[in-house]
Amino acid sequence: MAGTESLGRLFTAGRWQEWPTEQRSALREFLDAWWLHVLVEPDAKVPAHEALTLLAEVTTKLTPWLTLWAELLVDAVARRRLVTAVDEWMYDLLGDALPWSSWHDEDTWCRALSLWVLRHAPAVLREHGASTELYDHVRLLGLPYADRWDR
């Protein structure tokens, strides 16, 4: 995952948002198409949780990428990607930490990602036979931080 964080930071440091309109638009079009590919193509080479890291860091936005993923959860591949991502993220999210190091608002992004997982993961985890432990961790995520460790 460190690779996607670093690549995202390189784009940010390169100030791509200040590029000429045509170049900026081309990059954004690529990122949109790549995200769709990662979420729905069974042979995608990059896991969705790593792609999300890159996209959030490059664009300095998290919510639009999560919104599209939520819309695509009618697709079986996108649903499987969610199970994998939740498994990767859960340790950090339970500690109220973003699952990657960011140059941006980690606290806000962590809350947004946690709420998104709480809303979308439970049904998908049940559907895909995820472990009871993972399902319980998602349930604990809905509790205040101090209460998570009393259960």
Image (cartoon, grey):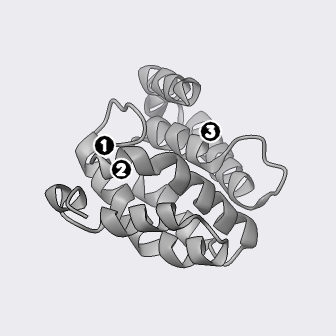
x and y, in percent, of residue 3 in the image: 58, 24
The residue where tag 1 is placed is 97
Q: Are marks 1 and 2 in contact (CB under 8 Å)?
A: yes
Three-letter code, disc 1: Ala
The single residue placed furthest to the left in the displayed view is 146
Circle nearer the viewer, 3 or 1: 1
The single residue placed furthest to the front in the displayed view is 151
User: What number is the disc on residue 93?
Assistant: 2
Could you say which quadrant of the image residue 12 lies in? top left
Secondary element at image label 3: helix
**Marks 3 and 2, Cα distance to the nearest angstrom?**
30 Å
User: What number is the disc on residue 27?
Assistant: 3
Q: Is residue 69 above or below residue 62?
A: below
x and y, in percent, of residue 47 in the image: 67, 45
x and y, in percent, of residue 96 in the image: 27, 48
* N-term-proximal mark, 3 vs 2: 3
Label 1: few (<14), some or many (≥20) within 10 Å? some
Q: Is residue 51 left or right of residue 11?
A: right
Q: Is residue 149 above or below residue 22?
A: below
Q: Residue at x 51, y 22 (%)?
A: 6
Label 3: few (<14), some or many (≥20) within 10 Å? some
Circle nearer the viewer, 3 or 2: 2
x and y, in percent, of residue 150 in the image: 20, 60
